[in-house]
């Protein structure tokens, strides 16, 4: 599955860019919420997610790069989130937060920074629906893919299988036409793509290329 990241869209033409994704082979729309505290960048918040939801025909995959994400679970549900992903590094009571996300009827995701080992999730494997492996340091689009991610995908795939979990493995950061096939082969289910899609001459064609990789 391909999830184009709206962070690389033209914010003055969001409706146009959401409609481009609607008409593509993308499975989800990836939405990066940043607070300037957990990550050194600010993006946008709830009203923008709700506005995207008005025009999107694909499920919203919301990636929270914010401290204390548990404070906004109900609000993101109301704004239209289908998947709600919090950072492991920002969650003191991760187990409770995952339960609260599921209780709202959303898929519960956990994102791991590049330095966080996948083994940190061993005791919540049955409490999550998605693991987002950050393949760049979160905060900005357009960074280079960190190759160590391949090892993490393989290790996580084995852990999920062992635990009997059907959780999705998502890769976020630096995904492009050169690494998409290898990531799928390593065990990734969802590929987030920002710059590679939105800076392409033909974004719909690039989504199709990543999809078919
Ligand atoms: C980075 C975000 C990513 C970002 C990916 O903090 O989580 O979703 O949009 O952008 P690219 O694909 O350009 O690396
Ligand atoms: Zn993201």
Image (cartoon, grey):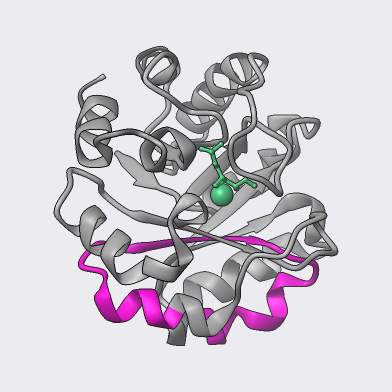
Q: Is residue 66 magenta?
A: yes
Residue at the location (37% across, 46% down)? Answer: 3
Residue at the location (57% across, 27% down)? Answer: 156
Left or right: 50 in relation to 155? left
Tell which quarter ligand 1 is in: top right
- In this picture, is 107 found above or below 140? below
Viewer-closest of 111 and 158:
111
Q: Residue 32: image x %, image y %? A: 56, 59
Image quarter (top left, top right, bottom left or bottom right) of the C terminus:
top left
Viewer-closest of 71 and 49:
49
Q: Residue 137, can we see it?
A: yes
Image quarter (top left, top right, bottom left or bottom right) of the N terminus:
top left
Provide the residue span drawn in magenta. 50-76
Residue at the location (39% across, 81% down)? Answer: 51
Q: Is residue 70 magenta?
A: yes
Left or right: 92 in relation to 188? right
Viewer-closest of 43 and 138:
43
């Amino acid at each position: 599955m391909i999830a184009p990241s709206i962070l690389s869209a033209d914010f003055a033409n969001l409706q146009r860019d959401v409609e481009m994704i609607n008409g593509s082979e993308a499975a989800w729309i990836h939405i990066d919420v940043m607070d300037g505290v957990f990550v050194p960048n600010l993006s946008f918040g709830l009203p923008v997610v709700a506005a995207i939801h008005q025009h999107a025909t694909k499920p919203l995959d919301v990636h929270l790069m914010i401290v204390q994400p548990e404070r906004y679970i109900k609000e993101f549900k109301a704004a239209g989130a289908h998947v709600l992903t919090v950072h492991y590094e920002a969650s003191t009571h991760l187990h409770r937060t995952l339960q609260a996300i599921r209780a709202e009827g959303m898929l519960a995701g956990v994102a791991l920074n590049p330095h966080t080992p996948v083994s940190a999730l061993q005791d919540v494997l049955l409490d999550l629906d998605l693991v987002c492996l950050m393949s760049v340091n979160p905060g900005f689009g357009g960074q280079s893919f960190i190759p160590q991610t391949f090892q993490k995908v393989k290790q996580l795939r084995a852990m999920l299988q062992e635990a009997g979990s059907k959780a999705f493995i998502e890769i976020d950061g630096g995904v492009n036409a050169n690494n998409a096939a290898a990531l799928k082969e390593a065990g990734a289910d969802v590929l987030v793509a920002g710059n590679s899609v939105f800076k392409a001459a033909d974004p719909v064609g690039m989504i199709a290329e990543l999809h078919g990789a």
